[in-house]
Image (cartoon, rainbow, N blue to C red):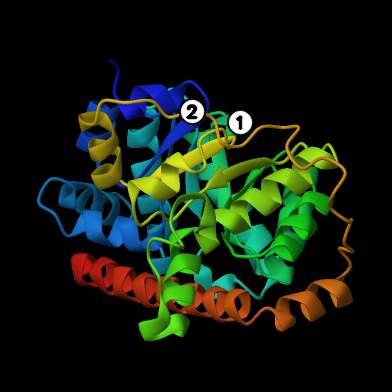
Amino acid sequence: MSSQLDALRLHTTVVADTGDFEAMKALRPTDATTNPSLILKAVQQDAYRPLLERTARDHRGASTAELMDRLLVAFGQAILNIVPGRVSTEVDARLSFDTRATVERARSLIALYEAAGIARERVLIKIASTWEGIQAARALQAEGIRCNLTLLFSLPQAVACADAGVQLISPFVGRIYDWHKKVAGAGWDEAANAGPNDPGVLSVTRIYRYYKQFGIATEIMGASFRNVGQILALSGCDLLTISPELLNKLAATEGDAPAQLRAGDGAGHIARIASDEISFRGLLNEDAMATEKLSEGIRLFVADAVKLDALIEAQRG
């Protein structure tokens, strides 16, 4: 019998959520995603520190912001030498509420990739799913720069992304699960909230059904998993981005991973929701979980970007 990982590949494109090249070589994902936290973790390891050292040495006159972008692209280039598909590279989270600056930073990242001989079709620019980030993605998509909207926790965010014509969204699972478990406290019933009943799984399932019902072409990539059960419950999703730890568990376990999401499921039962700015802000504000996790996610990525800045500055001496 094949492994659960091989079985999952029959229904879903498997993506590695890591900056670890060796893990990618072993696990053979189609695509890979990175974020400031993963890059920060990687450059503190002996195996990847030379990338930081070389970037700082080769571009001594560059600003810290430019060096960060060059470092991200250096990781992206190395990843694209391993995976056959695409890499997601994130715009600095400190720009999450600045549409113009996000557009400019994304253009800079794509220019660096193209200067290295990498076609823009192999790069997804990751942007936080704030209103400002979504509008930046709208402008970038119109220029042929494909975007991955991340830190997405709700259907209104997903609908606004679809309206903007983004290439791909990354609805989070584990962080939604974390929020509901924390709020429930001692009353949390793990068994009753597992698999298809997991609140994070339910959120992605709702988005998937909405997109399929209305014929939305934007790809859905489930992200932020805490356990294998969450992954298996979303088999059939367009893509799933998974940590090496969970990919290894799937690879080490014999079994099936039947599709749980199918394009026709739930068709005709979901009402269309508005995607204008007032509706977006109002609906997001009504969702305490989505509001809190979006803000928290941006703060965490900003904190790691600041730490990465410090490592770059220290390397420059």
**Residue pictured at 67% horizontal, 70% vertical:** 130
Q: Is residue 304 left or right of residue 252?
A: right
Using the image, tell me which numbered label, if any, was put on residue 258.
Answer: 2
Residue at image x 38%, y 29%? 29
* Front in this rendered view, residue 302 or 30: 30
Examine the image and state in which quarter residue 101 appears: bottom right
Nearer to me, 251 or 58: 251
Left or right relative to 116: residue 75: left
Image quadrant occupied by the N terminus: top left
Determine which quarter of the picture holds residue 31.
top left
Task: Name which residue lies at 52% across and 50% down.
Answer: 196
Q: Evaluate whether residue 276 shows in this view.
A: yes
Residue 155 image position (x, y, % from top left): 72, 61
Residue 186, given in percent of the width and then of the height, sits at: 36, 84
Q: Amino acid at mark 1?
A: Glu
Marks 1 and 2, how far apart at CA: 30 Å
Tell me if label 1 and label 2 are in contact, CB under 8 Å.
no
- Judged left or right of residue 305, residue 273 is right
Q: Which tag is nearer the camera, tag 1 or tag 2?
A: 2
- Check disc 2 and give the amino acid type: Pro
Residue 80 drawn above or below residue 311: above
- The residue that mark 1 highlights is 121
Q: Residue 177, image x and y in percent?
A: 46, 66
Residue 145 x/y as whole percent: 67, 42
Which structural element holds mark 2?
Answer: loop
Of the two numbered discs 1 and 2 on the same chain, state the one appearing first in sequence.
Answer: 1
Q: Which residue is the extreme one toward the left?
A: 46
Q: How many marks?
A: 2
